[in-house]
Amino acid sequence: MTSGAAEAGTDDVVDAYWRDGAVYLREAFEPCWIEALTAGIEAVRATSAGEYHWYVGGPGQERVFFNATRMWPRIDAFRRFVHESGIADLAGQISRSTKLNLLWDGVFYRTEGLEQPTPWHQDAPYWPVEGESIVSVWIPVDAVSAESVLGFVRGSHRMGRFQRRSFRDGGRTAHFVAGDSDAARPLPDIDAGVPGFEVVRAAMRPGDCLVFHGLTLHGSPGNRARASKLRAVSFRFAGDGTTFVHRPEGTSPSFPAEVQRAGEAVGGALFPQVWCAGA
């Protein structure tokens, strides 16, 4: 059991991350930080400013599943969390980087018993960035059973690229009209127990986190709990060697074309540096 985000990046944890593509950490964040994140998530729920993706329901509706990105510029709790909780130290250590930039945050909100899944997917192919040191830290603020938790496919960060599926229909259709290369593999029916695709899921408590690589396959069956919400926030970081890439079909989330300078290192006001080794 690991306690304290800044001290959680032990050699064993880093080795497990690079071997498996993801690692669950227990009690990485103190209750005061989870309370602050919860308040921030509910502030996001109360408004609809910024980039929101509504998969079920919409603004003002009771039953919802949505994802909102890049909330840190207006949610003070998220800014403080990035700089003061130890999360940047953790992501920097795990990515084996010398410096770290914040890409964005993502709020995920499912009301009670809302089972629409998050389809199996890799993050980086949807995004305007490329690199081996892209790290996400997923933090639930509600207790999550193994039946509802975000799981991952062990070693999938070394399996190449998979076709990008839509979140709006649970993965039944393509996310983009065009853009997947011929080398992108179709996703098998992972939930059916495909040989070579070992699914890892572990129940999580508030304060735990899942840290995963930008190419790790991950997904969730939805919120199967009838009496509790499933609320979580992810913080996405870019370590050494991460560069912008141009995707003519679009990206999710999207950014103005002038900040997507193909081949240039991630940086600038939209993607601030938040950690430096030894600082």
Image (tube, grey):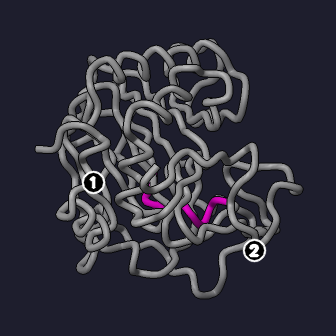
Figure check: 119 above or below 80 = below
127 or 192: nearer the viewer: 127
Question: Would residue 214 appear left or right of 256 to someone viewing this image?
Answer: left
| Residue occupied by mark 1 | 9
75 or 166: nearer the viewer: 75
Residue 231 image offset from top left, x and y in percent: 40, 28
Query: Which quadrant of the figure has residue 145?
Result: top left
Q: Is residue 110 visible?
A: yes
Q: What residue lies at 42% left-to-right and 54% top-to-bottom? A: 278
Number of numbered labels in the structure image: 2
Q: What residue lies at 62% left-to-right and 37% top-to-bottom? A: 69
Query: Which quadrant of the figure has residue 17?
Result: bottom left
Residue 123 within the magenta-colored segment of the rendering: yes
Q: Residue furthest front?
A: 279
Residue 115 badge: none
Q: What residue lies at 51% left-to-right and 81% top-to-bottom? A: 185
Q: Which residues are magenta?
A: 119-127
Figure check: 245 above or below 237 = below
Residue 81 image offset from top left, x and y in percent: 46, 29
Q: In what quadrant of the picture does the N terminus appear?
A: top left
Amino acid beneath label 2 = Gly
Question: Would residue 19 appear left or right of 266 to someone viewing this image?
Answer: left
For the residues marked 2 and 1, what is the alpha-carbon distance in whole angstroms? 29 Å
Amino acid beneath label 1 = Gly
Mark 1 or mark 2, which is nearer the start of the sequence? 1
Q: Is residue 145 visible?
A: no
| Residue occupied by mark 2 | 263
Question: Would residue 163 appear left or right of 211 to someone viewing this image?
Answer: right
Figure check: 185 above or below 122 = below
